[in-house]
Amino acid sequence: MFLTGTNAVTIKGQLVNLDMIGNRVAGIAFGPKKVVIFIGVNKIIENIDEAINRIKTIAAPLNAKRHAEFKTPCQITGECIDCKSEKRLCNIWTITEKSYPIGRIKIILINEQLGF
Ligand code: SF4
């Protein structure tokens, strides 16, 4: 069983994620027999375009601040400049439309602001 979070979930239930190396999205897509995703209300977004925008403008720069050793531009400015940093956090996008097989991915919505 793989327990994780998501960068965003649309009101249609699509999961939108952006990873540095892909370990999280890999586990969501394939491998573990069961995946449980915990999602705070702040991650519920209208649609995929808004989810992508939120991730690049809010989630990724905030995540970069947690990793002082990475020294990405957004750590200093708080804004994404689509950098070419060696330690760029934004490398692998995934959109999970549905769970295959049905029931492999379970979502737990939590009525709190959780994570970025
Ligand atoms: S692409 Fe670079 S500047 Fe933009 S959020 Fe990701 S790490 Fe920060």
Image (cartoon, helix red, strand yellow):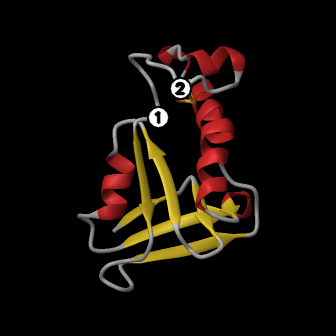
Left or right of residue 23: residue 74 = right
Label 1 CB-ligand 1 distance < 8 A: yes
Left or right of residue 103: residue 57 = right
* Residue sitting at x 52%, y 69%: 14
Q: Say the numbered circle drawn on residue 105.
A: none
The residue lying furthest to the left in this view is 31
Q: Nearer the viewer, mark 2 or mark 1?
A: 2
Label 2 CB-ligand 1 distance < 8 A: yes
* Percent coordinates x, y for residue 56 in the rendering: 60, 39
Label 2 sits on what residue type?
A: Asp
Q: Which residue is mark 2?
A: 82
* Percent coordinates x, y for residue 11 in the rendering: 66, 73
Label 2 with label 1: CB-CB less than 8 Å: yes
Question: Earlier along the polypeptide chain: callout 2 or callout 1?
Answer: 2
Label 1 sits on what residue type?
A: Cys
Q: Tally the marks.
A: 2
Q: Which residue is mark 1?
A: 90
Q: Is residue 76 above or below residue 30?
A: above
> Which is nearer the eye, 34 or 44?
44
* Residue sitting at x 34%, y 37%: 21
* Residue sitting at x 34%, y 74%: 34
* Residue sitting at x 49%, y 52%: 17
Q: Quadrant of the C terminus?
A: top right
Give neighbour class at mark 2: few <14, some 14-19, many 20+ (Cα, 10 Å): few
Of the four image quadrants, the one with ligand 1 is top right
Find residue 49 and report its image quarter: bottom right
Can I make out residue 116 in this image? no
Left or right of residue 68: residue 95 = left
Find residue 100 and report its image quarter: bottom left
